[in-house]
Image (tube, rainbow, N blue to C red):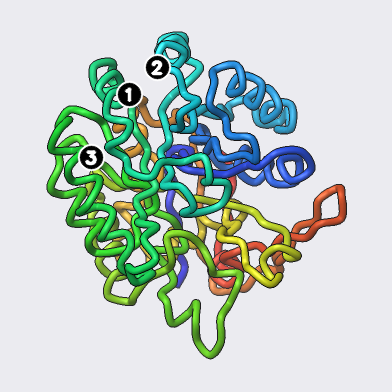
Amino acid sequence: MDLTIQIPRPDDWHVHLRDGAMLDAVIGYTANRFRYAMIMPNLTTPVSTVRQAERYRERILRAASEQTPDFQPLMTLYCSSELDSSDLLFGYEAGIIKAVKYYPAGATTNSSYGGNNILDFIELFEVMAENNIPLLVHAESTDPQIDLFDREAAFLEGELHPLCEQLPKLQVTVEHISTRAGVDFVLNYPHVAASVTPHHLSRNRSDLLTPEFHPDLFCKPIINSESDRKAIVDIVTTGNPSFFLGTDSAPHPISEKYGEEAKAGIFNAAYGLEVVAEIFAEEEKLENFPAFVSKNGAAFYGYEPSSSQLLLTREQVELDLAAMLSTSDGQQVVLFGLEEASHWTVTAI
């Protein structure tokens, strides 16, 4: 099928850029596609002060090409005992900080500084609610007695539901939803939205586990069942304003993905936009694609859509695309979405 669609330059409302040589290697994929990118703060040393966020932003912009002047990283702070509410207020009012990110301790990469229960930070969240500072939540239980595929639902019910009941005006994003429970939770709260990844839209746990475990599809929260995937696809392809693109692009070198313990994260910044376009095309809902990638998230975070445009074209011919990137220190990272992207071209207009 041959298709063409023009969209406002999209935004990525959840991305990991790492640091050092990895930052240098991956930044162009995000900066060349997206206007705004919500930068996750879980570096090896968490970004928990405004000064740390400023320095990290400087490194990001320095690494980004001078050919991408419209790209703007939006900085977040890591929710931990190190985060000072007065520093947060200063950073937010100065326009340096956009949001705070909560990680359950031990849930994912560099999350050891996170919380044991989200309600332990209720005083901080009260300040945030009063000042309209968004809270971004990695919604995943770390209780080992809970089945891996049920941990999003458990966290939503046991921790995020009580928080949203106590602070109904707190603006919350449930990050990278992976289940029908995530969809239903968002629909129940007017001040809650969700970011959605290309991989949770396009893959299910059979892809991850059959005929053997595929490290390149391992992420947190885990890719879930086909019925969960379909529930997410069904809601986002309607254009519902509470759901928007957050790639959760998270590069790891193959030495860490194929090691004894696979690191959680999928690098999809290169082809994630094409993967999502393919989903909307397959569902015959391409007219709602601009809302999901360019409009809904911008509106939720208080921005107008971009005035610049991208043109996406799908053709039957298959493009020859790179499957791997290399960093300056010799590491290699697998690129997700090669099959879908081989049919799409994306150009700025």
Please tell me which residue is depicted at 38% across the width and 69% down the height of the picture. Answer: 148
Type of residue at label 1?
A: Leu
User: Is residue 120 shown left or right of residue 340?
Assistant: left
Question: Which quadrant of the structure image shows residue 221?
Answer: bottom left
| Residue 290 visible in this rendered orientation of the protein | no
Secondary structure state at the residue bearing disc 1: helix
Check disc 3 and report the residue beneath it. 192
Secondary structure state at the residue bearing disc 2: helix
Q: Indicate which label's residue lies in the foreground, 2 or 3.
A: 2
Contact (Cβ within 8 Å) of mark 2 with mark 3: no
Q: How far across and how far down the image is residue 290, in percent?
A: 36, 46
Check disc 1 and report the residue beneath it. 124
Q: Indicate which label's residue lies in the foreground, 1 or 3.
A: 1
Locate the N terminus and report the quarter of the image it occupies. bottom left
Within 10 angstroms of label 3, few (less than 14), some, or many (20 or more) residues?
A: many
Q: How far across and how far down the image is residue 206, in percent?
A: 43, 82
Secondary structure state at the residue bearing disc 3: strand
Q: CA distance from mark 1 to mark 3?
A: 18 Å
Type of residue at label 2?
A: Ser
| Residue 340 visible in this rendered orientation of the protein | yes
Within 10 angstroms of label 1, few (less than 14), some, or many (20 or more) residues?
A: some
Please tell me which residue is depicted at 27% across the width and 37% down the height of the picture. Answer: 119
Q: How far across and how far down the image is residue 234, in percent?
A: 24, 64
Check disc 2 and report the residue beneath it. 85
Type of residue at label 3?
A: Val
Contact (Cβ within 8 Å) of mark 1 with mark 2: yes
